[in-house]
Image (cartoon, rainbow, N blue to C red):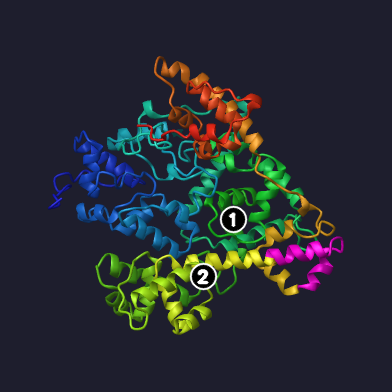
Amino acid sequence: MASTPHLFSESPLLTWIGDETLFSLVSRYHYFSGSRSNDATSMALFGHSRRGYQHDLPAGIDEFCHRTEGLFGTASEICTQRTLLCYYSKFINSEDELAAVSAMRSTTVTGLKYRLGILTSRFRAHHPLKACRRCMAEDLATTGWSYWHIEHQFPGIWVCAKHGQFLLESKVKSNGVERFLWHLPKADNLLPAPQLAPVAINELMKNLTRLALLTSDVMGSKEIVRMDLSYLHILYQAELRRRNLLLSNERLPLSKIAAEFEAHVRPFRMVHEFAALPGNPDQAYSQLSRYLRHPRAGTHPLRHLIMIDWLFGDYKKFLEACRAGMSPSISNTTLQYTASASETKEDSRKAEFSAAIQQDQLSVSGAAKKVGIDVATGMAWATKLGIKCDRRPKKLMPTRRAFLIEELQLGIDKAEAAARYQISVGTVTHVLRTEVGLHAAWKKIRLESALNSARKRWANLISENAGLGVKFIRKLEPALYAWLYRNDRHWLSENSNPRSHPESSRVLRAPWDERDTALSSAIANAILKLAPRLGNRSLRLWHLYQEIPELRAKLSALHRLPRTAVAIDRALGGKAKPSNDQASDGQAKQLRIDLDPT
């Protein structure tokens, strides 16, 4: 657009309502303006017909702020307060939060859910819109609008903390259905609450209400500014020790703990979103071995909230445990276990540097000068924000630099690269820090190489000294054992001599057969529900994965799910009837039809 109209100068009533989301505000504008086209609303507010429509982590926030002349706050405020980033930012460090804000302010958020650990969490990544019927009625009576409350959209929240009612999931924008649509909560678009026996529904509501109150308190806490995952790990261990669930040698009796944990999460699994929680003690054993033995980055916040719910029960007890475990050097206004004054100062300078580039439109050198750092540091900080820096090469001309970057992507050692290109190790480090994504890729490939080498050496030791016991074997290569213990403890415990670790010989594989049976049965039940609704209309694949949310994520693995593949094929009117319930890879690929419901 050549010029930006004053979109809100004549509509002073259109301002934020309570804990409204950005998606809700734009949807209200869509109705308020009388627009018949969803694309036109996106174009007017975000400058593009396919931008800003994401209801959870939208892109184009800078353009939105520009076109609304800052009426609704700064881009950073909108990202961290009016989108689901406010949920995830509680469990990530400040640098990752700045990078997420930077992505949302740009024109695309591609890869953001992966970087936040959402896609690999096995929880639902599409964040279904949810609403409370009583909230809708009250909002309509007091404000004239029914709108989307941000707290209702948090993962794991299925009960309205205010009214104690089950939140209902919207059929719209679920699993890609009408994903470009702007809309507000309406009774006709909400799916019914789960139909369960009275005893089961009471148990489910009790657990969901407790989790909703805990999540609300943690997310709204001013005392816990940001969760430090390594400190959470310490708190978990301390609580298990208090419950006498640690052995005398500080080892975790996972078999005993796993049964207790599985019993705790069992009621939650009645809701689709919690399907990733363990369904039996073996699965609980596998998950706890990852989340209790050592800290992990990129873990979905919902897993930690479930752990806190299990071990502490509510926010008050959790906060008391935090206070009891804090050292005197730690601020009582944050849960950053290793935070220091210098780190806090550096975080504020990074935020100022980011604002100077993205809001004040300064160059990297100009922003570096403004916050009092050298240009090389500024380039490194800008790279972490995903900003590409202009270069003035002295030694590394573009061609040589390209070759160096290619070798660094393959994991070449810095000293070897410096010798090969006749430059200093410092110059190689500078290239790593100032090329977007290069340092992370280099560290990843180096770690993978080191892991593979260490695993191979340890496997050879176990093979050559079979039956001697892990205590003897670790003395042969103490440095190797110590490195694996620090960097790959879960693998080490599973691949040590079974004579010393009988529990670790347990091999846990993905339960594909169980998943196949459950999904094929769910498809049969879904067809029975959908048939009266559809009438003479044809059943489409998107109808099935709207009814069974976890199905869409399994479409790429139908070769492992033969019964499910056959059930889908028959439901969609196919003729294939493979013998012995086996579906070939070709048949599975044939079923990967267009997922766009439009």
Which mark is first along the chain, 1 or 2?
1
Q: Is residue 113 left or right of residue 214?
A: left
Main secondary structure type of the part rendered in magenta:
helix
Amino acid carrying label 2: it is Ser
Residue 318 tag number: 1
Disc 2 designates what residue? Answer: 331
Residue 467 highlighted magenta (yes or no): yes
Which quadrant of the figure has residue 282?
top right
Residue 186 shows in this picture: yes
Which contiguous range is marked in magenta?
Answer: 455-477
Residue toward you, 308 or 93: 93
Residue 380 shows in this picture: no
Which quadrant of the figure has residue 209?
top right
Q: Residue 586's x, y, as percent?
A: 53, 34
Label 1 environment density (alpha carbons within 10 Å; few <14, some 14–19, many ≥20): some
Amino acid carrying label 1: it is Phe
Question: In the displayed structure, would residue 119 be above or below residue 143?
Answer: below
Question: In the displayed structure, would residue 47 be above or below residue 577?
Answer: below
Q: Quadrant of the C terminus?
A: top left
Please report contact status of discs 2 and 1: CB closer than 8 Å, yes or no.
no
Secondary structure of residue under mark 2: loop
Residue toward you, 57 or 145: 57
Question: Disc count in the image?
Answer: 2
The answer for how far apart the CA atoms under marks 2 and 1 are is: 17 Å
Q: Residue 435's x, y, as percent?
A: 39, 70
Q: Residue 299's x, y, as percent?
A: 55, 54
Label 2 environment density (alpha carbons within 10 Å; few <14, some 14–19, many ≥20): some
Q: Residue 321's x, y, as percent?
A: 62, 60
> Residue at position x 34%, y 36% from top?
139
Residue 107 tag number: none
Secondary structure of residue under mark 1: helix
